[in-house]
Image (tube, grey):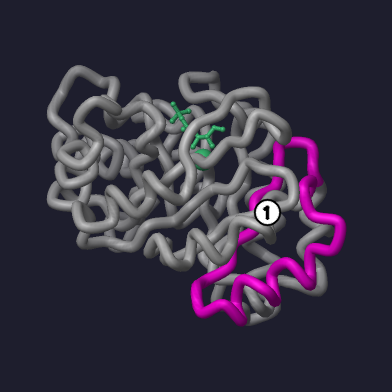
Amino acid sequence: MTSGVEIKVAPSILAADFSRLGEQVAEASNGGADYIHVDMMDGHFVPPITIGAQVVSAIRPWSEVPIEVHMMVEEPTKFIPELVDAGADTAVVHVEACKDLRSTVDKIVSSGIKAGVALSPSTSELSLQGVLSNLSLVVAMTVEPGWGGQPFIPKVLDKVTRIRSMIDDGGYDAELEVDGGINIETAGYAVKAGAGILVAGTAIYGSGVPVDQAIANIRQSVHNIN
Ligand code: DX5
Ligand code: ZN
């Protein structure tokens, strides 16, 4: 990794202190985050229930950077209007949750916010065909969706590289993000494989150092991999 490449960091508030969520969002926003990553879980697509539009609305004033909502929900289209109203900047749907991915992406874009698509670790990048031109974000999950604090799955890196090629070869605008198990040990491998945005929850909110320092540590760690 050369030092001139800009890497973006998206702290996942899943690992934040929910009793003072607004402040934790501000610490990230003021501390070098490029996006705030919000993990919405419905108890169906994944077992836990976490955050909905009401919390997105509550934290919106605390962030000066865009908020991306990672929708680990069944039937994501029904939640799009309320996320738009709550101030979400990007809605990310899971390939595995969409009966008609193309129409779901179209609905997000036509509602006036950016569209992203997430792929679980075993989902093929070929599922992006036909929607990539409408996407602002592709999220390659490097853990199984549902929980923070899981170990990074290195075999996803080959897929990250294939998605990078699809985006570059097609001349698409989508950014490529990895989500799950990213820390100072793994971040460089993800960037080397082609990721441009790093989501990190535990490594930022649970590292024992201030949020701004944890973000800086992840950025710095990327330069350790060649
Ligand atoms: C998992 C979520 C992740 C999670 C990442 O389903 O999508 O965003 O918060 O947490 P860490 O960084 O702890 O793996
Ligand atoms: Zn996530």
Instruction: Report the front residue among 160 and 138.
Output: 138
Q: Is residue 99 magenta?
A: yes
Q: Position of residue 155 (x, y in %)?
A: 69, 32
**Residue 207 picture quarter:** top left
> Element type at marker 1?
helix
In-image side of 4 versus 123 (left or right)? left
**Residue 184 picture quarter:** top left
Q: Quadrant of the C terminus?
A: top left
In the depicted structure, whether residue 35 falls above or below residue 208:
below
Q: Is residue 207 magenta?
A: no
Disc 1 residue crowd, few under 14, some 14–19, many 20+, Cα 10 Å: some
Q: Residue at x 82, y 58 (%)?
A: 127
Kindly tell me whether residue 207 is visible in this rendering.
yes
Instruction: Report the front residue among 207 and 154.
Output: 207
Q: Position of residue 224 (x, y in %)?
A: 33, 37
Q: Position of residue 52 (x, y in %)?
A: 48, 44
In-image side of 14 versus 163 (left or right)? left
Q: Position of residue 55 (x, y in %)?
A: 37, 44
Q: Residue at x 43, y 42 (%)?
A: 199
Q: Amino acid at mark 1?
A: Pro
Q: Residue at x 68, y 54 (%)?
A: 76
The boundaries of the magenta stretch are 96-123
**Residue 156 picture quarter:** top right
Q: Which residue is mark 1?
A: 76
In-image side of 20 versus 12 (left or right)? left
Instruction: Report the front residue among 85 and 121.
Output: 85
In the depicted structure, whether residue 71 falls above or below residue 186:
below
Kindly tell me whether residue 5 is visible in this rendering.
no
Q: Residue at x 30, y 57 (%)?
A: 34
In the depicted structure, whether residue 109 falls above or below residue 166:
below
